[in-house]
């Protein structure tokens, strides 16, 4: 009997998801002769009756999909099946309905592409339902443990770096300090990588406290050195000098860039402008690195199913694909470490990265 596996994307979208879908589909159908069912809108597709899904065939999954941002299966980052919201604001457990949806599709295994939160929920579901499961890490934040890279990170950094490239001429033309706020949740990987790659003068990270005096000194040093502009990158979860979290609408991170811009203007007298990249970091066409990582992850995930190695997550370490225990990967949150090589690089380049 032909094996039938399910594939879903869960959590926030990012570049490279479709490249994973392509790789999983091709490896499963052409490499093993299996059938692949693409599940719509993450676990929400399994809540519908009949379950919302489609058969994925290698003839449809061509190279054009490799270049496409987003996910053709759709995704969701709301509606935890273990605490699903009712219209009145209360919540109830629908996890058994998700598991029943898996059974209705007669699936032999499930491959889920998600961030740390999504993978945690998927693991709980598959453990409860005794569903063979393999996880693939994706997040622009690059904060999943036990893997050096996650699908989507490279493309988000590329967008942020390009933004710095495009802000620099305007900054120089108008003698301004340009502040760029980037995503990343509680991890500063995007800010650090883009800041180094984009020639920032200061990078503010959630992991390292900062003080206005240090930031002011850096900007004034740039000016005294004969340059009439400066570039500052701020991660969205950076706190104020007094340790306050800045949030925007619906309680999400956002607004710290404007706070920093105002403080710089007050302290230095410089004209400042603030750019908040927001979701531009998610929807780009994937970089070559994300395409490669996604392809390698997809192939290896299918091979794990074939080998009956479940409750595992594929990962990238030492320039190769490996697999690690899923529970350990979820537990090992990966923020910017004090010994991160890019921190050493940034400081070596004279970039202000807070007070350590």
Image (cartoon, rainbow, N blue to C red):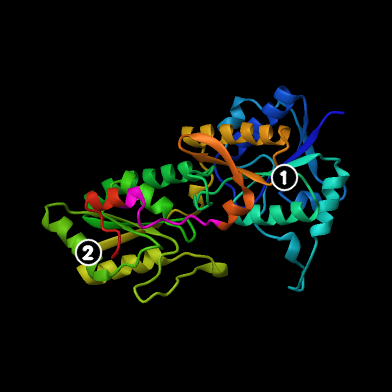
Which residue is disc 2 drawn over? 270
Horizontally, is 135 left or right of 102 in the view? left
- In terms of secondary structure, where does tag 2 sit? loop
Which mark lies nearer to you, 1 or 2? 1
Query: What residue lies at 49% left-to-right and 49% top-to-bottom?
Result: 142
Q: Residues within 10 Å of mark 2 (few under 14, many from 20)?
A: some
Query: What residue lies at 29% left-to-right and 51% top-to-bottom?
Result: 344
- In terms of secondary structure, where does tag 1 sit? strand
Q: Earlier in the sequence, mark 1 or mark 2?
A: 1
Quarter of the picture holding the N terminus: top right
Q: Residue furthest toward the bottom?
A: 242
Total numbered labels placed on residues in the image: 2
Which residue is disc 1 drawn over? 133
The span shown in magenta is 332-343
Is residue 228 among the parts visible in the rendering? yes
The quarter holding residue 132 reads: top right
Which mark, by number, is residue 272? none
Instruction: Provide residue 333's location: percent of width, then percent of height.
Output: 52, 57
Is residue 316 positioned above or below 238 on the image? Answer: above
- CA gap, disc 1 to disc 2? 54 Å
Instruction: Provide residue 118's location: percent of width, then percent of height.
Output: 64, 54
The quarter holding residue 66 reads: top right
């Amino acid at each position: 009997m032909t094996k039938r596996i399910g594939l879903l994307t869960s959590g926030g979208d990012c570049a490279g998801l479709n490249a994973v879908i392509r790789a999983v589909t091709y490896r499963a159908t052409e490499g093993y002769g299996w059938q692949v069912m693409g599940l719509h809108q993450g676990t929400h597709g399994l809540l519908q009756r009949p379950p919302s899904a489609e058969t994925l065939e290698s003839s449809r999954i061509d190279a054009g999909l490799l270049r496409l941002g987003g996910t053709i299966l759709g995704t969701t980052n709301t509606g935890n099946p273990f605490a699903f919201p009712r219209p009145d604001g209360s919540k109830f457990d629908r996890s058994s309905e998700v598991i029943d949806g898996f059974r209705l599709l007669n699936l032999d295994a499930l491959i889920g592409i998600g961030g740390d939160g999504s993978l945690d929920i998927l693991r709980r579901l598959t453990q409860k339902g005794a569903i063979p499961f393999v996880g693939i890490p994706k997040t622009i934040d690059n904060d999943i443990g036990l893997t050096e890279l996650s699908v989507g990170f490279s493309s988000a950094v590329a967008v942020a770096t390009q933004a710095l490239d495009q802000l620099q001429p305007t900054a120089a033309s108008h003698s301004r300090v340009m502040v760029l706020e980037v995503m990343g949740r509680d991890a500063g990987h995007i800010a650090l990588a883009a800041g180094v790659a984009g020639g920032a003068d200061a990078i503010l990270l959630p992991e390292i406290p900062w003080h206005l005096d240090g930031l002011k000194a850096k900007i004034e040093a740039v000016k005294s050195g004969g340059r009439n502009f400066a570039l500052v990158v701020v991660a969205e979860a950076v706190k104020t000098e007094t340790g306050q979290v800045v949030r925007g609408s619906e309680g999400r991170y956002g607004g710290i860039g404007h706070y920093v811009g105002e403080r710089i203007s007050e302290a230095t007298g410089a004209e400042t402008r603030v750019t908040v990249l927001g979701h531009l970091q998610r929807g780009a066409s994937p970089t070559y690195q994300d395409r490669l990582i996604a392809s390698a992850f997809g192939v290896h995930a299918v091979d794990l199913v074939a080998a009956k190695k479940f409750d595992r997550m594929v990962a990238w370490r030492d320039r190769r694909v490996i697999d690690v225990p899923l529970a350990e990967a979820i537990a090992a949150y990966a923020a910017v470490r004090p010994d991160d090589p890019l921190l050493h690089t940034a400081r070596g380049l004279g970039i202000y990265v807070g007070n350590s």
